[in-house]
Image (spheres, helix red, strand yellow):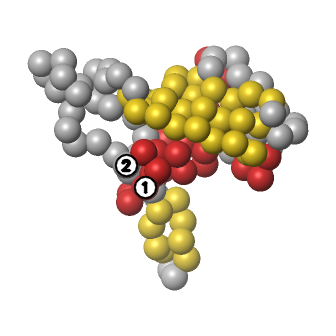
């Protein structure tokens, strides 16, 4: 199980530079943060097929309630899978199943990700 920070919006993940689509600076920083979280969790890289489970924790308001402004869960999936590519698995072609759900809010938001052999 890996705890990742609140993801970058998919709308801000990609940028066009010299007619090429590249990751934004925010996306690159998120990938670095994900790598650090993966190393802290002592995650292992899988060589075969994997199942990925994602729990998306929205940010909280000052009063502790869940923020009504949150990312779309389908965009969260893509950002999380891309951040773990090369860390939890060699290539995202190894993913045979993905599940995602909205979970309880936490102060700065985040993701709880489980990657297991299929």
Residue 42: % across, % down: 70, 17
Instruction: Quadrant for residue 48, please give it.
Output: top right
**Along the viewing direction, whichever of 43 and 76 lies nearer the viewer:** 76
In contact (CB < 8 Å): disc 1 and disc 2: yes
- The span from disc 1 to disc 2 (Cα, nearest Å) is 9 Å
Examine the rendering and report whether any part of residue 53 can be seen. yes
Residue 84 image point, x, y percent = 64, 39
Which label is found at residue 10?
A: 1
Q: In the rendering, at what x and y percent does residue 109 appear?
A: 35, 29
Above or below, 94 relative to 5: below
Q: Which residue is the site of mark 2?
A: 72
Few, some or many residues within 10 Å of mark 1 (<14, 14–19, 20+) = some
* Quadrant (top left, top right, bottom left, bottom right) of the N terminus: top right
Label 2 Cα neighbours within 10 Å, binned few <14 / some 14-19 / many ≥20: few
Identify the residue shown where x is 18% and y is 18%: 64
Vertical placement of 48 versus 64: above or below?
Answer: below
Query: Position of 14 compared to 49: left or right?
Result: left
Residue at position x 23%, y 27% in the image? 66
Q: Position of residue 44 (x, y in %)?
A: 77, 25
| Quadrant containing the C terminus in the rendered view | top right
User: With 31 as the anchor, is 46 left or right in this view?
Assistant: right
Q: Is residue 29 visible?
A: no
Q: Residue at 52% across / 25% down in the picture?
A: 112
Numbered disc 2: secondary structure: loop
């Amino acid at each position: 199980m890996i705890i990742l920070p609140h993801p970058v919006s998919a709308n801000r993940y990609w940028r066009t530079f010299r007619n090429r689509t590249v990751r934004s600076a925010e996306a690159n920083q998120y990938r670095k943060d994900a790598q650090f979280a993966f190393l802290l969790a002592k995650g292992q890289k899988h060589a075969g097929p994997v199942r990925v489970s994602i729990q998306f924790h929205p940010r909280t308001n000052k009063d502790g309630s869940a923020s009504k402004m949150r990312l779309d869960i389908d965009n969260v999936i893509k950002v999380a899978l891309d951040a773990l590519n090369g860390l939890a698995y060699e290539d995202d072609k190894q993913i045979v199943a993905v599940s995602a759900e909205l979970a309880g809010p936490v102060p700065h938001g985040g993701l709880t990700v489980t990657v297991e052999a299929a």
